[in-house]
Image: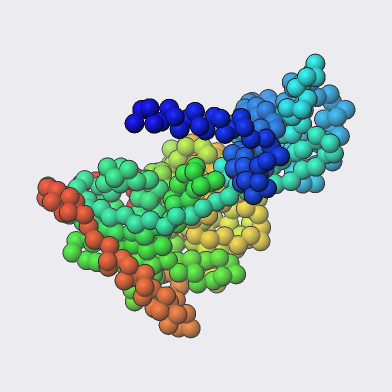
Amino acid sequence: MHIKRLIAIAVFIVLVFACKEDNIPSKAKKDIAEKIEEKKIIEFGFDQSQYEFKRDTIKKGDTFGIILERHNIGYPEIFQIAEKTKDTFDIATKLQVGKPYTLLYSKENNNDSIQKPTTFIYQNTLEDYVVIDFKDSIQAYTKTKPITYIEKTATGIIENNISLTLEEKGLSQVLANKLADDIYAWTIDFRKLLPGDRFKVIYTDKYINDSIYAGVHDVQAAYFEHKGDTLYAFQFETDSIKNIKDYFDEKAKNLRRAFLKMPVKFGRLSSRYNLKRRIAYYGYKIRPHKGTDFAAPIGTPIMATANGTVIESTRRGGNGKYVKIRHNATYMTQYLHMKAQNVKKGDYVKQGDVIGWVGMTGNTGGPHVCYRFWKNGRQVDPFKQKLPEAEPISDSLKVRYLEYIKPIRLRLDNIFFLEAELTKETENTITEDPLTDIQ
């Protein structure tokens, strides 16, 4: 066999040297060209064989001008680039510390004594980037890397808590957060899951350029067994204009309430609504506290507790920076002492949207958000209200919804728990899940 292989190699070499380019058939030439083309590596729309890529991140004190000056571009040219591209992307003001950028150097100019970049690429997010090209003429444009969504399924049986169950399976903790915060927040207390509780889920993972994992994108449907009850959840779009999606059970009942219990995910209740509060600093005089305080580190995201329209986003007196939202004719909420707001007057926000960040503006002794709850124009204690359920699905949509979930439920019912999961020993104790701090 070894001798035959040597003979075959020798024959191949002879044939190669015996052939001239002119003797190669046109179809063979085309196939060769296509194979060469396939080997090209394209990134940000540029051929890596034509450019040298130099990568870095924005450092404190970096500006577009400082970066380009470091790389041999003069200020007259920098000014011209910034001016001609500011309508597309204001590179002078929008660079953020820690964000990656790439400079491209044309390999055609490798013999030049002073190497200068021809292109600046700024990655605003993992998938979005801005290209400022000044090789021949100055142009700027934004692009998005190709995104692929892959549908997957997962099952699990709780031994300790859902976080550990997912970790053992190599699954993202984002999946735990979505189940606990987005889907079953009002129907299951995830701090008190029981050994033997189990779940099935259909979800999509997000990939950039088909290779870079970008996390869990969405959960289409879920099934949870808890304390002997079975709880289905199906995602359904109820308003295509406002892009509102909710989770409903198999009977079209909304799984969430109209209001979240608190405006921050991670924090502690530091001061309750109290109309008879006395403070030593004011000589123990009654100073009513009409808000509910949640202590959290500066910069903690503050969420809208329900869908609604922003009616105020400003700064005033002891309130500091705040946002006020009208949810309907009955309810309004207000969020005080923000470090900064993330919305403006007139914006429509959905439950869970980040509307600002915890700060210490106004009269405050420490970082927290003062959450105020208004019912019929009067401030009340949100914890003592019988909060309404979220809007039920309309009769016109209910028929469509029930038809929509039929094949999805069939898929859920045909996802079976693994034998290894079913045979695991579990202890009959209630365990606390550290996923959330308070309800």
Q: Quadrant of the N terminus?
A: top left
* Picture quadrant where residue 284 is located: top left
* Picture quadrant where residue 38 is located: top right
Q: Percent from the top left, x then y, of residue 68?
A: 76, 26
The residue drawn where x is 33% and y is 70% is: 409
Q: Along the line of sight, which residue is nearer the eye, 239 or 344?
A: 239
Query: In this rendering, would 312 be left or right of 227?
Result: right
The reply to whether residue 3 is visible in this rendering is yes
Q: Along the line of sight, which residue is nearer the eye, 12 or 250?
A: 12
Query: In this rendering, would 9 be left or right of 198?
Result: right
Total marks drawn? 0
Asked if 254 appears above or below 306 in the picture, the reply is below
Q: Percent from the top left, x then y, of residue 108?
A: 77, 27
The residue drawn where x is 60% and y is 70% is: 241
Q: Percent from the top left, x then y, of residue 369?
A: 49, 46
Q: Colour mode?
A: rainbow
Query: In this rendering, would 344 be left or right of 194?
Result: right
The residue drawn where x is 75% and y is 22% is: 110
The reply to whether residue 129 is visible in this rendering is no
The residue drawn where x is 84% and y is 24% is: 74
Asked if 144 appears above or below 385 in the picture, the reply is above
Q: Along the line of sight, which residue is nearer the eye, 219 or 380?
A: 219
